[in-house]
Amino acid sequence: MEKQKTAVYLNLCTLIGLIGMGWFIWYGIRHQLFVSADALKAFLSQFGLFAPALFIVIQMVQVVIPILPGAVGCLGGVLIFGPVWGFVYNYVGISLGSILAFLLSKRYGRPFVRQMVGEKNYEKYIGWLEKGKAFDKAFAVAIFLPVAPDDLLCYIAGLTPMSLKKFAAIIFLGKPGSIFLYSLGLTGIMEVLRYLF
């Protein structure tokens, strides 16, 4: 009986969370929050001290449901909060979002993953599961590289026997390098473009 209550509670929390994310995505699209780092900055500036927490939530959501390109989020974090805190908020948000994607995949399985990543991407990357035990190593390398489709691979990882503890360790150890390179690389490009134009 107690397990049944817990399952109902968890399903209800998941449903409320998905509805909340859905509403925020609808609001963001309607008010064009996700079109540029400047639009995101203007939106976050209204929230003062709560802006970092809201940015972390946005980064979490964009991993689970890609509402904006990861590059825009990472660049936005650095431009809005500076290189150090921008990196920290990007890291926390993206790591928590990756764990959430993994847990949702574990909970709801292949049909859910297929729906979230799209049929084409699903067919393209589902072959990674055939790697068996080698999947964990391939996944860790992919997470470390800034060019891999990390969000999609987090969903695929949820379909494997990998434990949450191992997944979290790979994310927490592998993400800093790629986020750092992504954030500062994009910032450098922006500075060069500003200088040239």
Image (spheres, rainbow, N blue to C red):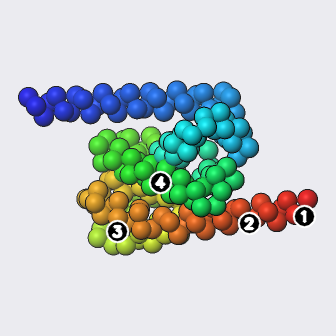
Q: Is residue 105 visible?
A: no
Q: Earlier in the sequence, mark 2 or mark 3?
A: 3
Q: Earlier in the sequence, mark 1 or mark 3?
A: 3
Report helix, strand or loop for mark 4: helix
Residue under numbered circle 4: 92
Q: In what quadrant of the picture does the N terminus appear?
A: top left
Q: Judge by depth and name the residue closer to the eye, 84 or 23.
A: 84
Residue under numbered circle 3: 136
Q: Earlier in the sequence, mark 2 or mark 4?
A: 4
Which mark lies nearer to you, 2 or 3? Answer: 2
Report helix, strand or loop for mark 3: helix
- Horizontal side, residue 160 vs residue 191: left or right: left
Q: Residue at x 30, y 27 (%)?
A: 12
Residue under numbered circle 2: 188
**Dots 4 and 3: beta carbons under 8 Å?**
no
Q: CA distance from mark 4 to mark 3?
A: 22 Å
Amino acid type shown at disc 2: Gly
Amino acid type shown at disc 4: Val
Expressed as whole percent of the image width and height from the top left, the position of residue 163 reads: 26, 59
